[in-house]
Image: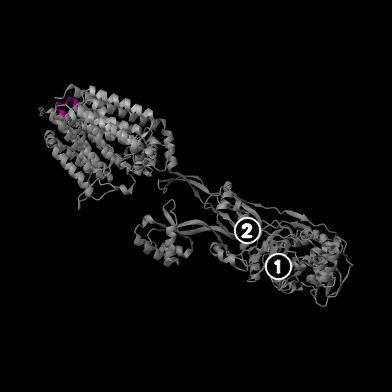
Amino acid sequence: MPSMETVYRIRRVGIGISLVVSILVFRLWSLQFLEGEQYLQQSIKNYEEGVKIPSMRGRILDRNFNVLAEDRPDYNVLFDKSLCPDKEQQDALLVTLSEITGYSDGFLRNKLAGSTPDLKGRRLLLQAVPFHTMVTVSERALELPGIVMESVPGRHWLHEDLAAHVLGYVSEIDAVSLEQRRDEGYRMGDRIGRSGIECSYESWLRGRDGQQIVQLDSLRRLRNVLRVESPAERGSDIILNFDLRLQRKAEEILGASVGVLIAMDPRNGAVLCMASSPRYNPNTYRRDAGRLANDTTHPLTHRAIAGLYPPGSVFKIFESFGLLEEGIVNENTEQFCPGHFSLGVNQIWRCWRKYGHGNVDIVEALRISCDVFFYKSGKALGITKMARWAENFHLGMTTGIDIPFEKAESFPSMATKRPWYAGYTINTAIGQGDVLVTPMELAVAVSAVANGGTLYYPRVASGVVHSTSGETWIEPFPPKVAGTIKASPKTWDLVRRGLWEVVNTPNGTGRRCWIAEFPTMGKTGTAEKPPLEPHAWYVCFGPVSPPVDDTGPDKDNIPEIVVVFLLEHGGHGGESASPVVKDFLEFYLNGGREDIA
Amino acid sequence: MLLNVFALTAMGVVLIAGATYGRPDMEGLWVRQTLWAGIGLTGIVCCLLIRVEWLLKCSWFLYLIGLGLLVTVFYMRPIKGAHSWILVSGFPLQFQPSEFMKLFVILFLAHRLARHGGEVKGFWGLFEPLLIGAIPAVMTLAQPDLGTAMIYAPITLVIMYVAGLHPAYFLLLFSPFLGFLGISSSLLHFLIWLVVLSAILVYALYREVTLPVFATFGVLNLGSYVGLRVFGPGMWEQLPLHWKNRIDGYMNPTFDTQGVNWNSIQSKIAVGSGGFWGQGWGQGTQSRLQFLPEVETDFVFSVMAEQWGFLGCVIFLGLITFLIARGLIRAQNSKHLAGAMVICGVMTLYAAHVIINIGMAMGLLPITGLPLTFVSKGGSFMLTNLLAAGLVLSLCLHESRNEFRD
């Protein structure tokens, strides 16, 4: 029989237990009521994660709404280990996959080992596989347990290397740009335009990534999509001034040779086509990057805006304005051309025609591109005024075109080169020596000659397509004037007559570009590049009416197209460049002119 | 009392089903739990059929068998690094002898202490029950299973207390821990140690603690103080890393939330996010998204709090407290001292598991890994708890039929 003492003791044990249990209940109450909301928030913070819904980039369209670049699904091959945990089976699977894709199974194994699993626990094996691979993998899915296909938006340039430099390419953002552009909402893995239109109109094209909130477990695996915070917004389409057919023709003309062909509308600075050869294929840029960087023909260089060439005789057009306006020559001034020009004893400059041209005035000097006339007159004009007139035409400055990475080399003058010798002036007078311009600079300057003195900013893009709430409208980019040329009507008459005669007289240097139903004015250029063949230039614009004296620039009848053509080491401008431009202009006349003009 | 046990077991099975809901790796766990509960209920019936008196008489034999099994586990393949299980080859069963050993210890202690009719005195009067509890505890600790080893302490002490051990002895028992003051070299700490220890020893002498006991504790105290004074600072470095981490984590709850404190913090989040009504059966992001580890054993209470909220937890705690209270009342009214001690031992077993497990889940105690009575996964554990309930019920049954004669 237990004593009373035992009963008390048992009671005390009970009281002790109850006390501790009540502490537990109090703690429970404190955790769940007093701090409950805070812990609930912490539990939400544990599993909630914002995940990007990638937006579709806007398309790039030509002036007739032909698609040049757009986002299409790319197929990635991923591997889900949980669906194929067996090691031997994995090996067999990689061998099968290597048969289908052509990658070695060692390569695939390295890929598998090197990749980190995504939110669904899958590892990326191959990115953007070709369509037929995707089909084969899907067909043989039974042999490939654990292999999953995922489609992600990828950039596709539909005409392969067409206008590659102008359109540009897109790649995953790198760490440096990410740091600089974090404020704009860029995040790791986002795509960004790297060059061309893709780069300069990035903010339009990009669209806005959406955000969805997903539920992750403790191993950061995706369990559930909880809600879409903001849907992805597709980027706006960019419309170009480009004409697909003209661009294609221009590139076809250039073919394998190295050169540039630009067609521009002198009425507003719209770039109709802009071919640069050689090119690269932006679709395979990532794979080819190494080879392209080492290629001696520099396919990555956008020669139209970043290729610097001596303009050769083309420069004589702009120099003529200087000569006439500064009063060095007038319509009656004649210079005798014996075929050479000497300064002092040992310095001799030759005219391109060995036996000389005899007595020539400025119109004839332009027509036959007499070097001696410009040596003599240029010496009289002096380098300072010559440089000022070159700068009036914005030579030696970037044009401000709407694609990035444009280059320019300052026009030579006493400010850029010291000491300055008289011989430099002679070289500069025929666009040689240190004169370096990009074909686009010439296109802008020639357009100003064509339209009577207005320098436009060249524009590749003509507008952006907005579509909000089902409504679509185009916001055009208005033409912008960069500067004007002021010259007397007399000057205009003489220069225009000179350029007219280049094409429309039997012994003009540009007669090979003569087209009966489409009268043009033009100028050839042959930029010496010893010991190599000279660069061949031809610039022209049309249609024009035959110049009538004392009318000045024909402001009512502005030509509709300016063509600037350069063939690197192509030989003489008159012989190799002008027939090509004729071919191009004939194509223009037979197709597409109505759409453009 | 049987209904109470039924209700708790049922709650446990339903909770386990909810905790493992949507977890393919733990599919069918609740079915196994139900099976074990069924076996356990059969065990209760068996207990009712035998007389606990008889079990007490051969408790020394059971105790020895238990020790034998605890030795055997060291020759078994370890599971999760612990030699806790006995595996029967070719038979899909494994059991933890350390669980059943708790019952054998309760029975053996009750049997030994009841001999003197509640008088616990003298050197062996103190050290015999201590040894009975300490031997299996040390063997379990070596498996290693710290949680289960700890449980022997409250069981042994409570049974000794009920058996009539004077509180002075408890003071003596805890006095060696004062030696920890020796870790620091400050004079103040030494003085505190000296004064408090002297007070305890004088009080013990005054309460007629016999000389051998007194001398033993004198030596123990001196030893612990000097030992810790000399080796104490170096000992910390000698501790296993995960012990140090746990102690560090417990001391600094905001430290290293991704590492040592992860479990504790996630468990508190789970408990806290339950609110009053809970997030519902099978719901609760902490358990379902695996932020909470060991949802089926050590942190099963956190799941209960998350899924069933304050309401569910209080119902559970109410039921178990009611069970313990009922048991203790029966013990008070028992005419059979050994039986009373067995009931107290069993109720302490329940209470200790509940308190330590829940304390851990709510961040009150360091994480040691101890299952929750009637709920946590584990066949041996479930069976032990139900057999323990069976012993109590059997005692009550036979008592009410007046079959005991002292």
The chain holding disc 1 is A
- Name the residue furthest right: A332
User: Which quadrant holds residue B101?
Assistant: top left
Mark 1 Cα-neighbour bin, 10 Å: few <14, some 14–19, many ≥20: many
In this view of the protein, which residue sits in the foreground, A388 or A412? Answer: A412
At numbered mark 1, what does the secondary structure look like: helix, strand or loop? strand
Residue at image coords 24%, 40%: B138
Residue A234 to residue A92: above or below: above
User: Which quadrant holds residue B10?
Assistant: top left
At numbered mark 2, what does the secondary structure look like: helix, strand or loop? helix
| Place of residue B78 in the rendered image (x, y in percent of width and height, measured from the top left) | 26, 49
Which residue is the site of mark 1? A565
Range of residues picked out in magenta: B331-337
Q: CA distance from mark 2 to mark 1?
A: 21 Å
Which residue is the site of mark 2? A196
Q: Amino acid at mark 1?
A: Phe
Residue at image coords 12%, 37%: B58
For the N terminus of chain B, which image quadrant?
A: top left
Mark 2 Cα-neighbour bin, 10 Å: few <14, some 14–19, many ≥20: many
Residue A515 to residue B337: above or below: below
Residue A86 to residue B323: above or below: below
The chain holding disc 2 is A
Q: Amino acid at mark 2?
A: Gly
